[in-house]
């Protein structure tokens, strides 16, 4: 044994073993943490997707009554007759009758799932996507600029549709 | 028959002869469009879709004479015209009446019909009625085109052409027509096929003239 060397062989071995154990432990902890993080992320993503899907399904379900009514209205003989005569006044007058049950201008659009879905306004658009004014008819209040902006994506698709087709309902933010 | 009776009869004969001499007639053919394609029945009111569907009405046109007629122009009979509903169709789907003429819309089907019109020339709504119920007659007091619909069956569509002239006739399914007892003078003959397709010809009708006037497709 060399008395000048402060670290004995045993101490060096101990140090080396500690380093090895520390390295292995660190690596294991690192890998485990990464795995855990990835699993957690996957789980959260899955949960988010499920919640989003169910939210959209609930939203679709709640608006389907209005969409179905709109589909019915688009097939209404009286509305078509008014359209043929280019009588916008008659168009809105008939629509007020046809939309009874799903349209209430005095009730704000329901966001609570417990409440029934009711439309708070309606408007007709011509073949170019321009809004036909409702005149004095109580068709609900809406900011014309917001509506025009919200209808922009529909305008292009309107011209390519047949007269009997209804554009799938979509959600647009109205400020 | 004694001599007193013979004199008025002879005078009457002379009058008829004179009228006939001042009359003209026009006949010809209108080239009609092909029959319309059938559309599906509206399911809205759960209509009886198993009901027999006959082919739609054959195409037809209304021919009429337009112009300034003298006071002794022909007076058309005020008989009530009919536009019945049969096999979920207006049959016929095109009739012409003179301004002030009345039309009935009897229901010959076993289902309800609800005839209405939003046309500017005549707006009416007969409500729902069954086969044996008699809806009121509709008097067409303004000239123009009146499109009639059935609220329950969207395929049903008819046209009442309300004309100011007493001289009109609907063609047969081949497009043939004949207008008789027309006054002499300068007039326009029109062939109304639909609102977007009205053909016309100017004519000079002379006493006793028989004109041949065809309306080929545009």
Image (cartoon, coloured by chain):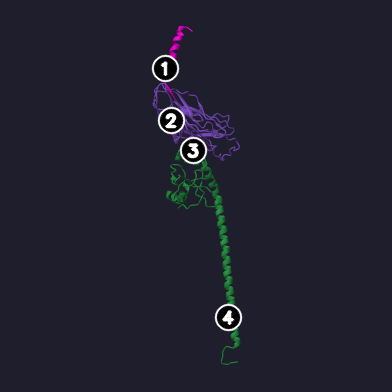
Chain colours: A green, B purple
State the separation of the CA atoms marked 3 and 4.
Answer: 89 Å
Q: Are marks 1 and 4 on the same chain?
A: no
Query: In whole angstroms, how far apart are the C-alphas of marks 1 and 3?
Result: 49 Å
- Say which element carries label 3: helix
Q: Do dots 3 and 4 share one subunit?
A: yes
The answer to whether one can see residue B89 in this image is yes
User: Residue A134: which quarter of the image?
Assistant: top left
Disc 4 element = helix
Whichever of labels 2 and 1 marks the residue nearer the N terminus, that label is 1
Could you tell whether A53 is left or right of B206 in the image? right
Vertical placement of B24 versus B14: above or below? below
* Real-space Cα separation, disc 2 to disc 1, in angstroms: 27 Å
Q: How far apart, in angstroms, are the residues tagged by discs 3 and 2?
A: 26 Å
Magenta residues span: B1-25
Could you say which quadrant of the image residue A17 lies in?
Answer: bottom right
Q: Name the residue under label 1.
A: B18
**Residues under numbered marks 1 and 3 in contact, where contact means CB atoms less than 8 Å apart:** no
Give coordinates of residue A111: x percent, y percent.
52, 52
Q: Main secondary structure of the magenta part?
A: helix
Q: What element carries label 2?
A: strand
Q: Residues within 10 Å of mark 1 (few under 14, many from 20)?
A: few
The residue labelled by disc 3 is: A81
Q: Does the magenta stretch include residue B10?
A: yes
Q: Label 4 belongs to which residue?
A: A19
Tell me the tag on residue B190: 2
Specify few, some or many for label 3: CA neighbours under 10 Å numbering under 14, 14-19, or 20 or more: many
């Amino acid at each position: 044994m060399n008395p000048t060397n402060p670290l004995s062989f045993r101490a060096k071995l101990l140090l080396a073993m500690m380093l090895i154990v520390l390295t292995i432990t660190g690596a294991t902890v690192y890998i485990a943490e990464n795995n855990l993080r990835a699993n957690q992320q996957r789980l959260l993503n899955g949960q988010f997707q499920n919640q989003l899907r169910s939210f959209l399904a609930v939203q679709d379900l709640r608006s389907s009554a209005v969409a179905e009514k709109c589909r019915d209205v688009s097939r209404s003989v009286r509305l078509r007759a008014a359209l043929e005569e280019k009588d916008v006044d008659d168009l809105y007058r008939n629509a007020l009758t046809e939309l009874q049950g799903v349209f209430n201008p005095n009730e704000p659009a329901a966001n609570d799932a417990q409440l029934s879905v009711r439309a708070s306004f309606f408007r007709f658009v011509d073949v170019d996507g321009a809004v036909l004014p409702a005149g004095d008819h109580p068709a609900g209040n809406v900011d014309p600029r917001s509506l025009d902006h919200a209808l922009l994506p529909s305008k292009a698709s309107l011209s390519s549709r047949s007269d009997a087709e209804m554009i799938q309902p979509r959600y647009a933010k109205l400020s | 028959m004694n001599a007193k009776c013979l004199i008025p009869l002879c005078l009457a004969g002379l009058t008829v002869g004179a009228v006939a001499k001042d009359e003209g007639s026009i006949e010809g053919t209108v080239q009609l469009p092909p029959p319309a394609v059938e559309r599906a029945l509206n399911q809205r009111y759960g209509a009886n879709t198993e009901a027999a569907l006959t082919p739609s009405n054959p195409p037809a046109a209304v021919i009429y004479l337009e112009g300034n007629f003298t006071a002794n122009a022909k007076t058309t009979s005020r008989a009530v015209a009919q536009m019945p509903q049969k096999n979920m169709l207006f049959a016929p789907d095109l009739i012409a009446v003179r301004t002030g003429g009345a039309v009935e819309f009897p229901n010959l089907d076993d289902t309800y019909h609800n005839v209405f019109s939003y046309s500017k020339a005549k707006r009416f709504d007969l409500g729902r009625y069954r086969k044996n119920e008699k809806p009121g007659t509709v008097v067409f007091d303004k000239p123009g085109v009146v499109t009639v619909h059935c609220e329950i069956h969207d395929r049903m569509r008819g046209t009442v052409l309300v004309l100011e002239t007493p001289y009109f006739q609907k063609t047969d399914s081949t497009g043939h027509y004949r207008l008789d007892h027309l006054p002499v003078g300068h007039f326009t003959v029109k062939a109304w096929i639909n609102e977007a397709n009205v053909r016309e010809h100017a004519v000079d009708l002379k006493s006793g003239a028989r004109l041949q006037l065809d309306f080929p497709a545009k």
